[in-house]
Amino acid sequence: MAKEISTQKELDEFLEGYHVLDQDYELIDIPTRLDHDEVVPSSSFMHDVWVRFKSNKGALIGGAIILLFIILSFVCPMLSHYSFDAVNTAEQSMAPRIPGLEWISWFNGQGGIRQYTGEFANAYHYFGTDVLGRDLWVRCWEGCRISLFVAGTAVLVNVFIGIVYGMISGYFGGIVDSIMQRFQEVVNSIPTLVILTLLLLIMKPGLYTIIVALILTEWIGMARVTRAQVLKIKEEEFILASKTLGASGFFIIFKKVLPNIFGQIIIMAMFSIPNAIFYEAFLAMVGLGVPAPQASLGSLINDGFKSILVTPYLVIIPVVILGILMLSFNLLADGLRDAFDPKMKEM
Amino acid sequence: MDKSTLRYIMRRLLISIVTLFVIVFVLFLMLKLMPGTPFNDEKLTEAQRAQIYASYGLDKPVLTQFFIYVGNMLKGDFGISFAIQRNMPVAALVGPRIGISFGLGIGAVFIGTIFGLILGIVAALNRNHFWDSFATILSVIGVSIPSFVVCLLLLILLGVQFPVLPVIYNNSAPFKSAIIPMLAMSLGVIANVARFTRSEMIEVLGSEYILLAQAKGISRRRLIWMHAIRNCLIPVITVLGPIIVGLMTGSMVIEKICAIPGLGSLLVKAIEVRDYNVILAISFLYSALYIAVMLIIDVLYGIIDPRIRLGKGDA
Amino acid sequence: MKQKERILKIRNLDIAFTTDNGTVNAVRGVNLDLHRGETIAIVGESGSGKSVTTKAVMGILAGNGKIQNGSIEYTYYDFPPERIAEVQTKYNGIIPDGYPRPEERKTVDIVKSTPKFIQSEIRGRRIAMVFQDPLTSLDPTMTIGKQVMEAMRYHYKMPKQEAWNRAVELLRLVGINDPEKRMKNYPHQLSGGMRQRVVIAIALSCDPEVLICDEPTTALDVTIQAKILELIKEIQQKKDLSVIYITHDLGVVAKVADYVNVMYAGRIVEKGTINEIFYDPRHPYTWGLLASMPDMDTSGDELYTIPGTPPNLLYEVKGDAFAPRNQFALHIDEKIAPPMFRVSDSHSAATWLLAPQAPDVQMPAELKERIERMRKAANWSPEKEVSYAAELHKGPAYDDNNTDDVETMEVNA
C-alpha cells in the first residue's frame, strides 16, 4: 500500500494475481445495491438485560441456589416426619446422620450427646438434633423460610413506602419536599442498630415486630431514587408541555416514573434482602429474635452458639446456610445490577 | 478554606446537632413509653414506688424531666443501672468498656482499610489476573457474609477444632484474645474497601487526565502514585462511613460471641435484662458516634477534594 | 528553498485491538509523513482510526491495542546528557527557546523502541499532545502549576523555582491572565477555554518538536474555538513546531492545515494539500465530507449526509471499505481494495474511479457548483497548486517511491 499508482505499469503490477475484467470497472447499479443495507436488528432493553444477565455465571449460580433454598424450605418441613417444634428429650443433641453419607465422619451420627442406638438405631437426623431433641434439618429449613419471609415482606413494604414517599416528596416539591427531605436526613442519621433495638423494646417480640423494625430502615434509598426520577420527569414534562403539568396529575407521573425506576428498585430490593436477613439474624443474636419454638436462621444460630463447645454442628450448619444464602443474594443482585446498567458495573 | 466551605460545614454541623437532639428526645420518649419500669415487677407499695420515683426524678412534669434528662446527658450522667448492677451509675458501668470497643473498632478499620486499599489497587493494576480474581472473590464473600458468621467459623476452627486461640476473651491476654474478633471484623472492611478502591481505581485509570499525565512522559510509578492513587483515595473516604456503621452493628454480636467486655456485649446484656438506662446510654453513645463519624467524613471529604470545595455538597 | 526535513514517517501501520468480541483492526496500513514546521490534518469520522494512529506515535495505545505491523520512524535531534549538563551550567537551566540544538540527527522506529525509551525520550518531551476535552483532561486534585511543571521537572530535572518561572511564562504565552494566581488554582476554578489553554501549556512545557492536537476545540464553544486555533498557530510559528490535527471538522481543517489526510475505516483514502482537498477532491468519501459541511452560500438546502454507517472493523473488510456507502462504487470495489492513485506530486486518492479504465464520474452537481464558487473566490487553479505544493516542501509526498524514470499516467480530471 505504500506504493502510489501513477502509471499503467504500476497498476498492472498491483493487479497481478487478480482476475479483473473490463466490466469490473462499471458502476454498480445503485437500486439493487442499496437493498444490501444491513438492517441491524434492534433489540429491546429487557432483552439486552436478559442477555447480559445470562452471561453472568455468578448471578445464575446465586439465583439457582436461592431458588433451591426456597423450594427446600417449603418442601423439607412438609416431607419430613419430624416436626420443627416437637420436643423429645430422648433425642437430645444427636449428631448429624445422613443415609449414604455415613462414611463421612461429619455425618455418621457419632459424637452427639444421645446416640443412634436402641429405638433410634434406624433414625436419621440429617443435621442432628438440638438440645431439646428437635430435628435440626426441619428446623433449619423452617428457619430459612421464616428468614426469607421476614426479609421478603420487609423489602416489599419498603419498596412500597419508598416509592410513595419519593413520589410525594418529588411531586409536590416546595415546602413539602423540604420537610420530607429533612425528615429523611434525620432518620438516615440514626444508626439502624439503635432504631432496631429501641423499637423492639417497646413492641412485643415476634415475627411481625421484626418485620416492622426492618421496614423502618431500608426505605430511604428507594425514596431517593424515586424522588430523583420524579423530578427528572417533571422537568421533561415541563419542557414538553409547560402548562399541562397540573393536568397530567399524580398518577400519570407515577406511570412514567415507574418504568424508569424499575431497574434500580429491583436492584436495591435485591441488595436489601440479604441486608434484612442479616438484621434478622442480628436481632436474634442480641436476644430480640422470633420467640421459641419458632425458628429463624438467626435464632438457630443464637441457640446453637450456646453449646458451641459441645456440639459445634448446631451453630455451624445454620451459619453456613445463612452465609450461602446471603452470598447468593449478593451475587444475584450484582448480576442484576450489571445487567440493568453495564455502566454501574463494579460500583 | 473559603466562605462557602465554612457555610457547608456549618450547615452539616447544624443538621447533626438537630439529629442528635431528635435522638435524645426519642430516647427520652422511650423511657416514658417503656412497658413499665423495672419496679413494676417487684412487689412495692405505692409509697415505696413514689419514693423511688422521686429519687429518680420521675415525679416531675414531663417537660422538666426531659430537660433534666438532656442536662444530665450533657454532663455524662446517664442515671443508674436498674438491673445489671443495682444502683451503679451507668457512666461507671459504660466508661471502662468504651476503650475496649473503640480499640477493637479502630484496629479493624485501620487494618481493613490498609489491606483493602492495597488489595484494591493491586487488583485494578493487574486486571483479569490472579490478584484481580482473588480480590473479586474475597470482596464478594467479605461483603456478603456477616462478620459474626466469620467470627463463629473462626472460633470453631481456631478455638475448638485447633485450639490455638482463646474462645473467650481473656483479660490477661488482650492481644491474643483480640485476634479472632479483629480478623472477623476487618474482613468485611477489607472486602468493602478493596471492592470500592478497585472500581474507583479502574475508573481513574481510564480517565482523560491519566491519559494526559501519561502523555507527559512521566514514569509509570509517578503516574500511579501521583495521579491515579491520589485521585482514587479521596472517594474511598466516603465508604468508610457506612463501613464504620456496619462495624458497630457487627461488633455487638461479635462482642457477645467472644465475650469481650465492651459496649456491644453490655448492650446485649442490658437488652436481655431490660436495663433501660444502660440501653439508652449506649444507644446515645452509638448515635453520637455515628453522627460524628458521618460529619467528620463529610467535612474531611469537602476539605480534601478540591472539586467539592464549592459548598455545593448536597447533604 | 531548502527541502524541509521529514521528522515523522509512518509506513504500513496496522493496529489491532483485542476485545471480548474479537479482534478489531482499527488501523489498516496507514502511511503518513510529517515535515518540520508544517501542519497536517487527519480527518475522518469517529472510529476511523485517526486517534489510534497518533496514540501509537505517542506510545499510549490502550492496553488491549497492539501494533501488528509497520513502522513509525521518528527523526529528532539527539540531546545527549553531557550536552544537557553543559547547557544547564551555561544557562542555569534548560535550553532557552531558539537555542540551536546540537546537530545530531537520530532516527528511531517507535514501533521497535522499548516503552521506557518512548516514555523518557519521546513522549511529552519531543512529541506532545493536546486532548479533546479540557474539562476532564486535567487532574482535578492537583494545582495547575504542579501540572504544568510536572513534565519539565521530570524530563529536565529542572529546579523547582525555575520550573515555576517557566510555567508562569508558559501560561502567559497561552494567554492566561494573572498566571501567578492561576498556578495555585485547581482545574475546576477555570473555564473550559482556560483549561484548554493550560493543556496546551502543558504540552508545550518541554519544548516539543511535534504537537498532536486531538480534536482540540470540539468541546469548546465556537468563539473560544477560533481563539484556541489562533493560539496554536501563533505558537507553531514562534517555535517552528510541526502540528498534527486530528479532527472530524473540515472547518477547523480549512483554518489551520497545510496538508490533509482523509481517513476512513482505518485507512487513508485521500491526501493532498489543503487546496487540493477542498478545491479538487477525488475520493467519493471526501466529496461526501465536503458536501456535508455547512456553508453560508448554500442556504436553504438540507445538509447532506453520507448514507449508512462505517463498517464494523471486527470483521474483515473485503475490497473497498467505503463501497457499501458509495453511490459511485464500481464492481471492482467489492473485490479489491483500491491502491492510492497519484493525482499530483502531493495529491493522491484511493479510489478505483481514478483508474484509467474507470468510467468518467463527476462529483455531485451541487458540490461541484459550490467548489467552483470557492475556487473562484480563492482564485485557485490546479496549475497554481503545483507550485504551491512545491513551495511547501520539495519533492513528492512519499519520496521513498522511486518515480523518476516512469512515464506519467493520465488520470481522469
Image (cartoon, coloured by chain):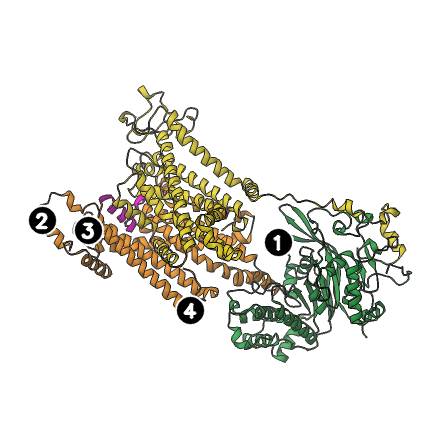
Q: Which of the two residues, A103 or A186, is positioned nearer the viewer here?
A: A186
Q: Residue at x 31, y 39 (%)?
A: A208
Q: Percent position (x, y) of residue C413?
A: 86, 61
| Element assignment for label 1 | loop
Cα separation between marks 4 and 3:
46 Å
Q: Which residue is mark 3?
A: B81
Highlighted range, magenta: B256-273
Colour-to-chain, green: C
Q: Percent position (x, y) of residue A34?
A: 75, 46
- Chain A as rendered: colour: yellow
Q: Which residue is mark 4?
A: B4
Please state the chain letter of the residue tagged with numbered disc 3 in the rendered image: B
Q: Percent position (x, y) of residue C12?
A: 76, 56
Q: Tag on residue B48?
A: 2
Please state the chain letter of the residue tagged with numbered disc 1 in the rendered image: C
Q: Residues within 10 Å of mark 4 (few under 14, many from 20)?
A: few
| Element assignment for label 4 | helix
| Element assignment for label 2 | helix
- Circle 2: residue type: Gln
Q: Nearer the viewer, mark 4 or mark 2?
A: 4
Q: Which residue is mark 1?
A: C63
